[in-house]
Image: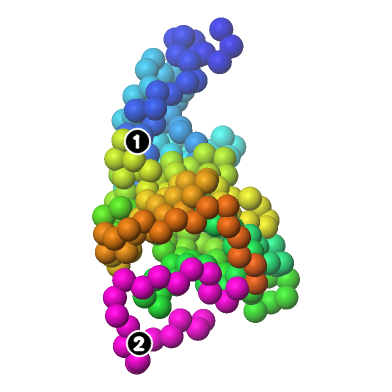
Amino acid sequence: MEGKNKHGLSRYIPEEVKREVRRRCGFGCVICGFGFYDYEHFKPDFVDAKVHDPKGMTLLCSQCNQKRARGRLSAHTVEMADRNPKCRQEGFASEMFDFHNAPITVKFAGVKFHNCQHLIVVNEQPILSVKPSEHPDGPMLLSGVFSNSIGQETLLIHENEWHAKTDNWDVECIGARITIRSAPGEFALVIRMEVPGGLVIERLDMLYEGVRIKGNDDILEVSINGGLWHKWQTCSMTNCFTGLSIKSRITAANDSVYEA
Ligand SMILES: [Zn+2]
């Protein structure tokens, strides 16, 4: 039957098998650490596999996959990398966001920011910022930090290069979307790229310096030190230096200023 190998094994890989492979590999290509990948049978190859055994499967990005398919990367090297994955060595899987050189739009749960510099600021620390490149043709540069609902960092972004940390419970990258879960069914962050002009934070549940920030497509909610939920819905900001500025502690006159 089409899509099945000679042993009748379908190409469909059960979710729990994929998750086990992702976690063991540190959520990226075992050779180069890229955060977008395919699931590869290497021991044995898919044509000879009788089951989807997570121990005989690994993660390879499309480039490393091509090298393997065209005979420029050996099964031995893949097996060695699978035992000592690049992401596990570095502590993160990484890739780049692709933006054009014109102002970008970030839809951050219920709030849309267009051409803003510091989107959300907590205690004078911007958690998401955008600035133009020094080169006129260079892309807009996004930097930021996301954490889960107990304050552990999940995703760091430095000038468009994102790092998804390997100590997350799960990171899944499919198509243009990064999904980070902190437990089964618990979403810490879902980001979708809208190249080249934007990014959508589809879901979020983070704690940062006592500030809980939760959101979905419809609403952004913020609770400071466990207090009442502040809510923003269908709102947008354009050309702002600072979008939302939140304080969870009293600031001193000599506290740093976040001018980039
Ligand atoms: Zn690779």
The residue at 41%/19% (across/down) is 49
The residue closer to the viewer here, 8 or 26, is 26
Farthest residue to the bottom: give it: 254
The amino acid type, in three-letter code, at marker 2 is: Asp
Tag on residue 185? 1
Residue 174 rendering spot, x and y as whole percentages:
52, 39
What residue did someone put label 2 on?
255
The residue closer to the viewer here, 41 or 189, is 189
How far is the residue under mark 1 from the one under mark 2?
39 Å
**Above or below, 221 relative to 255:** above
Asked if the beta carbon under badge 1 is closer than 8 A to the nearest atom of ligand 1, the reply is no
In the rendered structure, does residue 244 fall within the stretch colored magenta? yes
- Quarter location, residue 2: top right
Residue 155 appears in the picture as rendered: no
Q: Is residue 6 left or right of residue 234?
A: left
Q: Is residue 174 left or right of residue 240?
A: left
State which region is magenta: 240-260
Mark 2 Cα-neighbour bin, 10 Å: few <14, some 14–19, many ≥20: few
The amino acid type, in three-letter code, at marker 1 is: Gly
Q: Earlier in the sequence, mark 1 or mark 2?
A: 1
